[in-house]
Amino acid sequence: MQRNSQAHIYPTTIQLHVKQAIKKVRIHKQASCHTFRHSFATRLLQAKYDLKQIQTLMGHTDIRTTEIYLHVLDDLGDRVKGPLDA
C-alpha cells in the first residue's frame, strides 16, 4: 500500500513559525501570515497583473475584495503612463 508523501501542515504551525521568525529578526512592526498575502497582491498589481488573475490567485470569490488592493498603487505613486509622458 502506498502512503501519501505529502504531510499536512496546520495553519497554526505556520503562523507560529512566522511569528517566531519575525521576532528573531527583530521586526518591531505588526506582521503575520496575512501580511504576506497583502504583499503578494501588491506585487502582482505592480507587475501589471489583471485584477481577475489576482482574484483567482488570492482565492477571492468577489472582485470587490480584490479591488481593495488598488489603493496601494496610488499610495506608491504607481500610475499608468501614457505614450506622451515619456
Image (cartoon, helix red, strand yellow):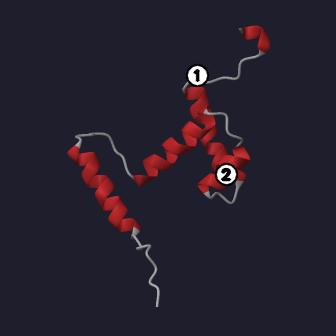
User: Is residue 36 rendered to the left or right of residue 75?
Assistant: left
The amino acid beneath tag 1 is Gly
Task: Kindly state the secondary structure of the residue where label 1 is placed.
Answer: loop
Q: Where is residue 16 in the image (x, y as percent from the top left)?
A: 30, 60
Q: Where is residue 50 in the image (x, y as percent from the top left)?
A: 71, 41
For image coordinates 45% across by 47% down, the residue present is 36
Crowdedness near tag 2: few (<14), some (14–19) or many (≥20) residues, C-alpha within 10 Å: some
The amino acid beneath tag 2 is Gln
Q: Which residue was labeled with disc 2?
A: 55
Q: Quadrant of residue 30?
A: top left
- Quadrant housing the C terminus: top right
Q: Where is residue 51 in the image (x, y as percent from the top left)?
A: 70, 44
Q: Which residue was labeled with disc 1?
A: 77
Q: In this view, does 30 lie above or below 73?
A: below
Marked residue nearer the N-terminal end (1 or 2): 2
Front one among 49 and 23: 49
User: Is residue 38 rendered to the left or right of residue 33?
Assistant: right
Q: Measure the alpha-carbon separation of dots 1 and 2.
A: 22 Å
For image coordinates 52% across by 44% down, the residue present is 40
Q: In which quarter of the image is residue 74?
A: top right
User: Is residue 28 rendered to the left or right of residue 58?
Assistant: left
